[in-house]
Image (tube, helix red, strand yellow):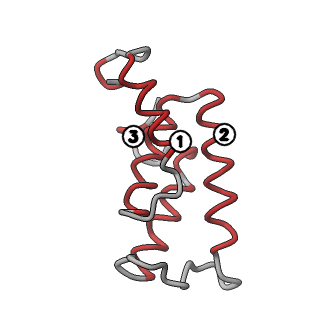
Amino acid sequence: MFLTGQHQADEIKEAVRYLKAHFDARQHYWYGHYYAARAMHQVGGKEWKDWYAKLEKTFLPMQSADGSWSRVERGSPGAVYQRSIAVIALSVPMNYLPIFQR
């Protein structure tokens, strides 16, 4: 909806409610957080700030002392995948991927 310019569409509000209600859902946990971070960044404002704070609060304590996310979570494809998603999701505010820039 955002990419089509419909920034206030009811579907966006409903999607935000859904993402917030399912933040801790275990199904597709890492993959889901990758896309949820992108979507919430597009929404912006307080919703994004709150989401990102929760993402940091969740992901950073899972990080090992050596900087990796090596404790493999249940249902994860593996440590490398998990680490990659964590880094990409946490780097969303840096706007590294041009397609997701505001």
| Distance of label 1 from label 3 (alpha carbons) | 25 Å
Q: Amino acid at mark 1?
A: Lys
Q: Residue at x 47, y 29 (%)?
A: 102
Rendered residue at 41%/46% (across/down) = 97
Marks 1,3: beta carbons within 8 A: no
Give the residue type that dot 2 points to. Answer: Asp
Which residue shows up at 28% across the image and 19% down it? 4
In 3D space, how far apart are the residues under numbered discs 1 and 2 (Cα atoms)? 10 Å
Mark whose residue sits in front, 1 or 2? 1
Front disc: 2 or 3:
2
Residue 24 or 32: which is nearer the viewer? Answer: 24
**Residue 70: which disc?**
none
Q: Against 31, is 2 above or below?
A: above
- How packed mark 1 is, by other alpha carbons closer than 10 Å (few <14, some 14-19, many 20 or more), is some
Q: Amino acid at mark 3?
A: Pro
Tag on residue 98? Answer: 3
Residue annotated with mark 1: 20
Contact, mark 2 vs mark 3 (Cβ under 8 Å) = no
The image shows residue 24 at horizontal and vertical percentages of 53, 57
Instruction: Point out residue 40 in the picture as x, y percentages from the top left corner.
Output: 50, 37
Residue 59 in picture, x, y percent from top left:
61, 65
Query: How many other residues sit within 10 Å of disc 3, few (<14), some (14-19) or many (≥20)?
Result: few
Disc ID at residue 50: 2
Tell me the element at label 2. helix
x, y percent for residue 57: 69, 58
Relative to residue 80, is residue 65 drawn left or right? right
Q: Mark 1 or mark 3: which comes first in sequence?
A: 1
Which residue is more in the foreground, 3 or 74?
A: 74
Mark closer to the chain start, 2 or 3: 2
Q: Is residue 91 left or right of residue 76?
A: right
